[in-house]
Each structure stands twice: as C-alpha cells, then as structure tokens.
Amino acid sequence: MPKPYNQTCPIAQALDIVGDRWTLLIVRDLFLGQRRFSDLLTSSPGIPPKLLSGRLKRLEQHGLIERVIYSEYPLRAEYRLTTDGLTLAPVLEAILKWGLKHCFPGQEELREAIRQKFASAVSAAPATGIETAAG
C-alpha cells in the first residue's frame, strides 16, 4: 500500500484513496461495464493481479465499490461501484476532458467517440445526484 500523505488537506486525503497508479483506471473500467476480476485485468494491461486485488480491496474498504458473489461454487465475484463510487464520475470526466485537450492528439472523430463512450457509461449508471456535463 502506498505511503499516505498524512495531511489535513481534502485533496491529499482523496489522493490517499484514489490517487495512486491504477486506481482511477479501475474505477474507469467499472464505469465502462467491466465487473469481473479477469475483465479488469484484461482492460488494464500491465497491472499485476496482486496489485489489482489490493486496489479492489482498498476501494471496497472505503465504500467506493462492492464485491458481489455471483457463484458459490466455484466462488466467483464481480465488482460494482457504490453510490459513493459513482460520485467519482465528475472527477473522471474532468481528467478525460483535460487529457483530450492536452495529451491526446487523435482525430476529432476518435476524440468524440471517447467522449460519447464515457457519457453513455455515466448516463447508464444509477443516479447519484451529481451533475456532469455527460449526463
């Protein structure tokens, strides 16, 4: 587990939970419909399984995701964003917009397809009471 910032600043405290490598990409994948451990591994090439497991446990401990058993034998689970996890949509949207503007020189058609995919994922998520430009 990464060393916490140990600051009273709310930004630092939020980064203690979601600010390390891979965590927001896991949240992104959950918004985009990935639910199973194997799907999350596939959608983020390079993430070690042990690290993914640790990030999922931490997100669950902080109430941002829930682990739902869908098969007892063999034991299988899927992961879902909780109401609190869904409130990360505007954070991801802001990073997406910034990334498209400053880091992603792709064709406008591809950029728009990425925007639309995220907007569709957010609008398909249960209502959170949080307004985003996507929904």
Image (spheres, rainbow, N blue to C red):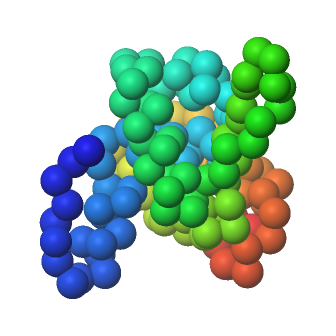
> Quick check: 7 above or below 5?
below
In the displayed structure, does residue 61 sit left or right of residue 47? right
Q: Which image quadrant is residue 78 in? A: top right
Quadrant the C terminus occupies: bottom right
As rendered, which of 83 and 97 lies closer to the eye? Answer: 83
> Quick check: 102 above or below 6?
above
**Residue 32 visible in the current orientation:** no
As rendered, which of 90 and 17 lies closer to the eye? Answer: 17
Q: Residue at horizontal 43%, vertical 21%?
A: 49
> Quick check: 72 above or below 5?
above
- Relative image position of residue 96 (x, y in whole percent): 48, 53
Q: Residue at horizontal 61%, vertical 53%?
A: 65
**Residue 67 visible in the current orientation:** yes
Q: Residue at horizontal 30%, vertical 63%?
A: 15
Q: Residue at horizontal 77%, vertical 36%?
A: 69
As rendered, which of 57 and 31 lies closer to the eye? Answer: 57
- Relative image position of residue 32 (x, y in whole percent): 68, 41
In the displayed structure, does residue 129 sit left or right of residue 108? right
Label total for image = 0
In the displayed structure, does residue 39 sit left or right of residue 13? right
Toward the front, the furthest residue is 73
- Relative image position of residue 62 (x, y in whole percent): 49, 62
In the displayed structure, does residue 24 sit left or right of residue 108? left
Quadrant the N terminus occupies: top left
Q: Which image quadrant is residue 95 in? A: bottom left
